[in-house]
Image (cartoon, helix red, strand yellow):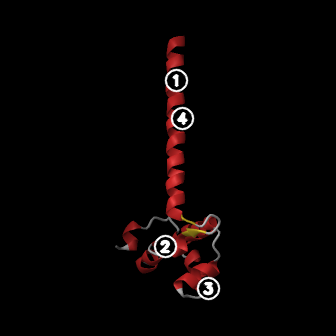
Amino acid sequence: MNNETFYSPSVHHGRNIKRLREILGVKQEAIAAEFNIRQQAVSDWESKALIGDEILERIANNEPALVCHHCNQPVINQIDKLTEMMERLLKAEQEKSALLEKFLAREK
């Protein structure tokens, strides 16, 4: 995969890594230990707009680094739960809209 092909100025790999790390409550030192690198290297990742494929794949494939330390569950489980909840909320909003449209149609 060629990063230059898929890179968009609105995408900042480093900020995305930092956001995920902060959401999970993981310190840079913990990520560094997991990857057997210095903390400064993690800081460098987080400052780069574009990160190479090798590092991105390494991050994506490292399950132990992707554990929510607040809940001791893999992030995937949390994302699945969040997606499920959002789908339920969307369905409820769609049902409310449909009812409102029926009500408004009767009023005309």
Q: Which residue shows up at 50% across the image and 65% down it? A: 11
Callout 2: SS: helix
Q: Amino acid at mark 2?
A: Glu
Q: Earlier in the sequence, mark 4 or mark 2?
A: 2
Structural distance between the alpha carbons of marks 3 and 2: 21 Å
Q: Which residue is mark 4?
A: 93
Structural distance between the alpha carbons of marks 3 and 1: 55 Å
Q: Earlier in the sequence, mark 3 or mark 2?
A: 3
Q: Which residue is mark 3?
A: 40
Question: Can you give x and y, in whole percent of width and height, for residue 98 in the image?
Answer: 49, 26
Structural distance between the alpha carbons of marks 4 and 3: 45 Å
In the image, which is nearer the foreground, mark 4 or mark 2? 2
Q: Which residue is mark 1?
A: 99
Can you tell which quarter of the image residue 57 is in? bottom left
**Residue furthest front as drawn:** 72
Q: Amino acid at mark 4?
A: Glu
Instruction: Please rate how many residues cluster around mark 3, counting C-alpha atoms within 10 Å: few if below 14, some from 14 to 19, many from 20.
Output: few
Q: Earlier in the sequence, mark 1 or mark 4?
A: 4
* Residue 64 in view, yes or no: yes
Q: Which residue is mark 2?
A: 63
| Quadrant in the picture for the N terminus | bottom left
* Residue 10 in view, yes or no: no
Q: Which residue shows up at 54% across the image and 87% down it? A: 36
27 or 8: nearer the eye?
27
Relative to 1, 42 lies left or right: right
Instruction: Please rate how many residues cluster around mark 1, counting C-alpha atoms within 10 Å: few if below 14, some from 14 to 19, many from 20.
Output: few
Q: Amino acid at mark 3?
A: Gln
Q: Earlier in the sequence, mark 4 or mark 3?
A: 3
Structural distance between the alpha carbons of marks 2 and 1: 44 Å
